[in-house]
Image (tube, rainbow, N blue to C red):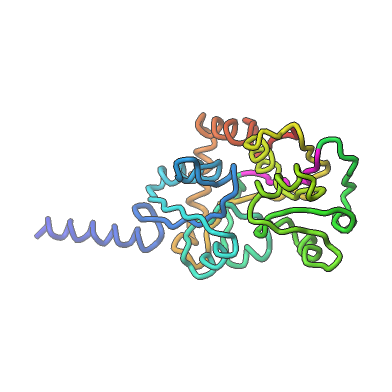
């Protein structure tokens, strides 16, 4: 009888852990394809800075990850419906905070910048509305910058071409079909390296904005109350050489929460 009671107690414990979003369960991860933070590699497997961080945390917490890629509009819908337990990667914005729980610390500071052809005389003085009025711009449909820009992107006077991805935007720029591309600096550098055109493009300063990017937990998902657990595991992981190596591999720096400098 004692053996049966012990076995039954273990079953109850396992059931309790699963119900509370703790170790020992599968975790659904939704993501936009956004290199080098999160992407599919040449073998079709999830890869990138945010993915590798999440995998390291999941190994510590015994989470079994299933990472799926969708357009951002679809990611938002799935998160709101509770069909995602984790979302990669999310900027700190009030609208996102309504349905996603944010950990204490971001995984990086994302800098959105203006990319122009090398030798261009265009400058950016911090007046986003003025720049959008004067120049033709390419950006992908799911691109988010900030609330100010959202007021401009659909304005009748804004010459903004929306495309399917960052690579298309930079090809348009290099072919002189647009004057500028709005993109985060890490993605811009990675795409230009892939196209072997890094030296043909300049990233203007100052950046459009600089926003912390997070691994988040949809409030309707089963890990909504796991931010403290994640924070502890992340703090421990940051002390490892593996974390430093990831920063160097994907961000080009070993400094915490840094970003690649202008090429």
- Where residue 83 appears, x then y in whole percent? 46, 65
Q: Is residue 33 left or right of residue 83?
A: right
Q: Nearer the viewer, residue 149 or 219?
A: 149
Q: Examine the structure image and report whether residue 43 is included in the region drawn in magenta.
A: no
Q: Quadrant of the C terminus?
A: top right
User: What residue is at 54 percent from the left and 37 percent from the top?
Assistant: 238
Residue, far left: 1
Q: Work out whether 222 lies above or below 250.
A: below
Residue 109, magenta (yes or no) = yes
- Placement of 31 over or under 167, stated as above or below: below
Q: Main secondary structure of the magenta part?
A: strand
Bounds of the magenta span?
108-117
Residue at image position (55%, 62%) is: 75
- Where on the picture, by quarter, is residue 10? bottom left
The image position of residue 208, as x and y in percent, is 79, 49
User: Is 248 displayed left or right of 182 in the figure?
Assistant: left
Q: Which residue is found at the position 64% from the left and 52% from the top?
A: 165
């Amino acid at each position: 009888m004692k053996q049966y009671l012990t076995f039954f107690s273990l079953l109850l414990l396992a059931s309790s852990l699963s119900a509370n979003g703790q170790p020992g369960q599968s975790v659904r991860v939704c993501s936009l394809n956004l290199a080098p933070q999160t992407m599919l590699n040449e073998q079709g497997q999830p890869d990138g800075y945010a993915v590798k961080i999440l995998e390291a945390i999941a190994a510590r917490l015994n989470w079994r990850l299933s990472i799926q890629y969708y357009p951002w509009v679809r990611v938002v819908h799935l998160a709101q419906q509770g069909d995602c337990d984790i979302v990669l990667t999310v900027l700190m914005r009030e609208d996102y905070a309504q349905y996603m729980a944010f950990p204490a610390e971001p995984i990086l500071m994302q800098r959105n910048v203006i990319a122009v052809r090398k030798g261009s005389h265009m400058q950016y003085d911090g007046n986003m509305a003025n720049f959008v009025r004067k120049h033709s711009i390419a950006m992908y449909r799911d691109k988010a910058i900030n609330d100010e820009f959202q007021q401009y992107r659909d304005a009748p006077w804004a010459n903004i071409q929306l495309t399917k991805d960052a690579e298309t935007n930079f090809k348009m720029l290099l072919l002189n079909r647009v004057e500028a591309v709005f993109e985060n600096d890490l993605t811009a550098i990675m795409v230009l390296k892939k196209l072997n055109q890094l030296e043909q493009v300049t990233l203007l300063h100052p950046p459009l904005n600089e926003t912390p990017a997070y691994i988040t937990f949809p409030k309707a998902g089963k890990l909504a109350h796991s931010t403290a657990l994640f924070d502890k595991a992340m703090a421990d992981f940051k002390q490892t050489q593996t974390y430093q190596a990831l920063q160097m591999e994907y961000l080009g720096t070993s400094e915490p929460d840094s970003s690649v400098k202008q090429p």
